[in-house]
Structures are given as structure tokens and as C-alpha cells.
Image (cartoon, helix red, strand yellow):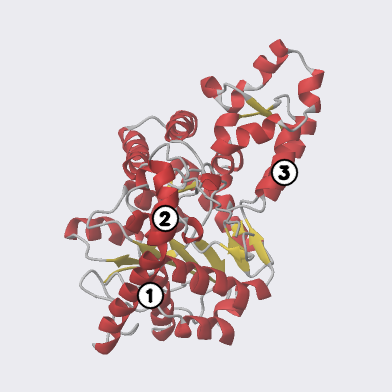
Amino acid sequence: MLRISVHYHARLPELTGPRDMHQILGPLFAPFLRIEYFLSAWFEFLRFFLTGRTWRHRLRRRAGSWPQPPPGLRRVAIFAAFHGPQVSLSNLAYLRSLQAAGLQVVYLHNGPLSAATVEKLEPLCAAVLERPNLGQDWGCFKDGFLNLRRYGWLENTEWLLFCNDSVHFLGDQVGAAFARRLDQEFETMPEPVLALNENLQLWQHLQSFFVAVRPEVFKSPRFVHFWKDYLPLSHRYHAINKGEVRWSLKVLNHYPRRVLYSPSALFDYASKAYEDENWLGISQLLIPKCCGSVVAGLRSHLAEEISADEDRRKVPRSGGRFTTSYVYWDQLMALMGILESTNTSHSCALMFCGLLESPFLKKDICRHNTYTLAQMRQFLEYHFSNNCDESPESRALWSEILGSYVGQGTLVSYLFRPRVAFRKGLMYRGFGISQESLPNYGNR
């Protein structure tokens, strides 16, 4: 008998560094992290539920109480916050802008507040309340909405705003301009839903860190039932899928809506500038770190029609001394067609601020690897030098925002912190930090 022996030598992948090791171990850890996160969220909820702490009893009144609705109440904001005992300068600037837009703010904080913080907040808010950190910002929204409804605050209200402090607010000067625009939108827009950003990833949904609705929406049975039924788990993916996405699919998408900052608005800006402006484009400082090669592949008629000297003279206004390479207006219009299907609050963040005068920057855009820390440092220097009066307050806010980004680190800072990475949304699809997401356009 002829015997043939076949020897198979499995070739193991070569490990070139910690990132490769993370790629191999990620799939092994992810199921355990998913189960542990899910169980801990449920145990926390059951602990509150079994002691009778429902939405009617979770709000602590030591920092304030539910007063009678202010006379002439027209606009109410539920502001969900989480910042430790001391309030940030960013939040105070945000509250001043909402107040200037005619909103009475109900400030709900997930955790205790110091007496000094309450003293700072009370002049800017109609009510300041503490609650246990159950369900994160969506727990705040549920408790706030149902209690406002319970205590009669919404009977004659024309607009109800849901917002949170997952964003940095870029100061009082841009805040004043935003307040004027928001007031004008509330007075004139026909749509019953207003949002800052919309996300087309996976499901079309409005991003919940700023959504305002009229009575025809917030008094509708489907809206009330959604909030009564929502389970406030302290779980990121539950809040996204059962909160933010489901809120849009089941309620908000049934109504006409207006989105303030979108790729379409940037496209319109670029197309008008292409026809009317003397300037040729913007600095690559404003686009995501992964888009440089994309832009390089987009043909520009402007670039073909001008000389290099004219190019250098006509673009720097869009980035000042930080302009090292350019995105021409026709390239920017093409780029918007690519970015519209991404998480635009991340991928278009600096363009919304630099071109459309948005005062908002998401706090995790460096951690999610959309922009580099160097980009953020340069942009903040450019923004505060051009859009804010020089003062100790503006310098302190600049330092606070930059310190927040630096303190979080970047995506690779979490390679060996899988539990933290999973809970912060950095383990995409549960398989670790993938090569495909380095860099990315702003994943969830």
C-alpha cells in the first residue's frame, strides 16, 4: 500500500506590534465584554426598580425643586449634564446662549453638585436638579420630560428642546450668533422638528444631543408612549439603538424636520463661494484626517485654471497661517457627497464650525480618530484668535476644551483597555480596533 503523507504547516500571522495583537485578541474578549456590560446595566436598573425609584422619584430636590411654570413660558430645554461636582465653562456658555434664545432651562445632572456650582447655575436655569446616574443622558431625558408633563410645564409651551453636554460649546461670541439664529428658527420655521445633525449610518436618525420639537410632536400619543416605555439602562449601545435611533424611527421621522448643520448646507456654501467668492477654498485643517488622499483624487477645475502664486494668495483666509494644503470649492462639493453617509457630527465637525459658524464640537472626535490632536490644537487656536475677544475667560475656555481632548487621548490609547474601549464605542462591531477604522469618518 502506497501511503502519501501530507504535512501542513499552518502559517501564523506575523505580529508586528501591539495593534496586531489587539486584532487577534479582540474577537476573544468582545463576547465577554458584551455580556458583562449588558448584565451590569440590568443589575443596576433592577436595584433602582426594586427599591421603588422610578422616574417619579429619581430626581433629587436638594439642588432645587419643581417650581410652578414661569409666567409666559414659551420654550423649555431639558439639559442633561454629567461633569462632576463643578460645572464646566463650556456648559455655562451653552446655557447663556440658550437663555438668550428665550429658553427656560431645566438642568438635570447625573450625580451630586456642589453648592458653588448650584449658585452658578441658578441664574441661568429655571430649575437645577440632581439624579442618580441611571441611564446616562437618556435617563435624564425620560425623567425630565415625564416630570415636566406631570407638573404642567408643557401645557402652553411652544418648543421643547432636548440637549446634553456631550459637546463643547465654543464661547459667548459664537453663542450669541447661535442664539439669534435659534430664536429666528423657532419664530419662523414651519417644520415641527429642529435638530443640529442627522446621521444616515445604518438607520436615518436625528442625533439626540440637540433636538427641539413642537406641541404637535411632544403631545402626540406616540411621543409620550415612547418615553414611558423607554428603559433607562446605563448602556451605550442600548441608548443608541433603543433610544436615539428608535426615537427617530418610531416618532421623529414621521414629521417634517429641519437640520441646521448638514453636508447639504456645506455643499450650498461651497457652490455659492465657487461662483461669488474671491477665495478658492479651505484649508485641509478642516477636513477629517483620512480625507487628504480622497481630496487628492478629486479633480479640481479651479486648481487647473490658476497659477501657484495666485493659489497661495487666495486661500489662506480659510486657515490663516495653518493653511498648508488646500481643498478647492469644487473638491469640497464632491467631498460632501462622500461624507453625507457618515456620522457627520464627527466627520464634518470642523467644517461646521469654520464655515457655518456652529458653536458645537463633539467631545470624542479625537478619541474616535476622526481628527488628530494636532488638528484640534491648530483649529482651536485659529477659532479663538478670529472669533473670540481676547480675555482671561476665552483663554480659560480654550484651555479647558483642548485639555479635554488631550486628556482623552486617541483611539490607540485604548488598545490595552478593552473594557473601557468597548464601553466608549471604540470596539467597532465587537472585533477590536480594526485596521479599517484607522482612520475613520466618525463611527458610532
Where does label 3 land, which residue? 267
Q: Amino acid at mark 2?
A: Gly
Where does label 2 land, which residue? 26
The percent position of residue 161, horizontal first and vertical second, equals 50, 67
Q: How many marks?
A: 3
**Contact between labelled residues 2 and 3, with CB atoms less than 8 Å apart:** no
- Kindly tell me whether residue 389 is visible in this rendering: yes
Label for residue 21? none
Residue depicted at 38% across the width and 77% down the height: 143
Residue depicted at 49% across the width and 56% down the height: 428
Mark sitting earlier along the chain (3/1): 1
Label for residue 233? 1
Label 3 vs label 1, nearer the camera: 1
- The secondary element bearing badge 2 is classed as helix
Please tell me which residue lies in front, 224 or 367: 367
**Contact between labelled residues 1 and 3, with CB atoms less than 8 Å apart:** no
- The secondary element bearing badge 3 is classed as helix
Mark sitting earlier along the chain (3/2): 2
Q: Amino acid at mark 1?
A: Leu
